[in-house]
Image (cartoon, rainbow, N blue to C red):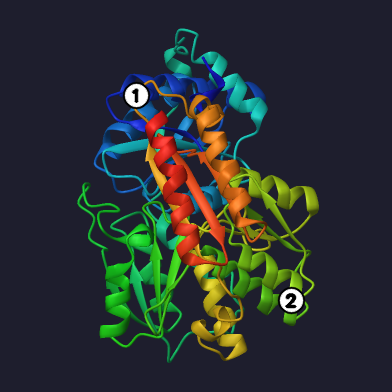
Amino acid sequence: MAKSFFGTDGVRGPVGSEPITPKTIVHLGWALGSVIKKHYGKGSVLVGKDTRVSGYLLESAMEAGLSSAGMDVVMLGPLPTPAIAYLTQTARANAGVVISASHNPYSDNGIKFFSANGSKISDQIQTEIEQLMDVPIEVVASEDLGKAFRMDDAVGRYVEFCKGTIPRRMNFRGLKVALDCANGAAYQSAPAVFHELGAEIEVINNKPNGYNINEQCGSTHIAGLQKLVLDAECDIGIAFDGDADRVMMVDRQGNVVDGDQLLFVLADSLHKQGRLKGGVVGTQMSNFGMQKALESRGIPFVRAKVGDRYVMQELHTRDWALGGESSGHIICLDKTTTGDGLVSALQVVTQMTFMQKPLHELASQMQMYPQTMINVRLKPGSSAADVLARAEVQASVNEKEAQLQGRGRILLRASGTEPLIRVMVEGDDEAEVASCCQHIAAVVEKQV
């Protein structure tokens, strides 16, 4: 099976088509269980999910596959992706599985794997799993089959962990917080955390029905949260995506504060306190304004390829603690092992409390450069690499780079989670940036 069976953060695809089908998930569970048992012996694997209706089907299939390999299974139910990473460590499990398609529509689903230490599985383990996907399932003897259990207090354990990532004596009394849970995995934990920390909360999109996850809500559709913040006169608004590993915010004036700005707020505040470990890792999509603002403060900044796996690799290589993406996937390695929307939100509110300044004032210290991105959808059978390599596309990029004359930058890349080519242009002139992006996107779309 091709290496591309795994995306940058798991197996993805619509239910009912390759690679995500119940049959595939049973096989995948068996392959994971077999590899984990070979390396670490018989033990347990935690399985969590978001709120998609297909999660009921796929968690049963995953349980069957793991059991057939002789691994015990602990079912967690709906829970944020980073919560599964955390609980995999604390429950001393051999691995963790998340059934989620993140910010995608309810009709999509996918799989993410975590190792025993709460990080993404290694390339070696991933390769061995892929190899077993081409091998017929061999069910262990009846006496060796795995058993299934349920962790009834999973949400409570995660809530306590999140609260523990801020100073023990700190509370958010006097703060009015609006929460948009995207009808997703944070619908229980996010309100509980902020309520228990003393904040007055206003909550929307916390009633999942299996079909409304990410539907005109959450971090990818933030207008509803902006309205709530203004109407309810909140101090801050916080929006998560479907599996709650991303966060976007709204300040009290109703302005959206994206992942780059949140990353800057954290880095700038921690740097002023002398508590920033090393520098900051962004991505190829990070706003040029963040780079300039960090550099002006003497804070080192590097760009990784798009994807939390690559940000994480760069952080580990440099022994830094803070990195993230414009989409709101922020990694605080001094607090947890993976990107966590709720933990990241708590760190930002902590800095607001510590600095005694509202979010808009902290974020205004960074000047955002105008940035336009257009997604061009690939047709079935189209190759993003082939389209991007075509002479017409390269010529359009060269033409617009010459026009910008070093006052901006252009980036074309394939999405890691959807059949899209993302065209991004950034520069100091908003109208010029939009025009350049539209021109290049039109060329790409013609080639598609």
Q: Residues within 10 Å of mark 2 (few under 14, many from 20)?
A: some
* Gap in angstroms between the C-alphas marked 2 and 1: 47 Å
- Residue carrying label 2: 271
Can residue 74 be seen at all in this image of the molecule?
A: no
Compared with residue 309, is residue 186 higher up or lower down, i.e. above or below?
below
Residue at horizontal 79 percent and vertical 53 percent from the top:
318
Can residue 3 be seen at all in this image of the molecule?
A: yes
Residue at horizontal 44 percent and vertical 36 percent from the top:
444
Residue at horizontal 59 percent and vertical 85 percent from the top:
169
Q: Residue flagged by tag 2: what amino acid is it? A: His
Residue 275 placement, left or right of 377: right
- Looking at marks 2 and 1 on the same chain, the residue that comes earlier in the sequence is marked by 2
Residue 182 placement, left or right of 149: left
The local secondary structure at tag 2 comes to: helix
- Residue carrying label 1: 380
Q: Nearer the viewer, mark 2 or mark 1?
A: 1
Compared with residue 183, is residue 391 higher up or lower down, i.e. above or below?
above
Q: Position of residue 148 (x, y in %)?
A: 39, 34
Q: Position of residue 447 (x, y in %)?
A: 42, 29
Compared with residue 251, is residue 423 higher up or lower down, i.e. above or below?
above
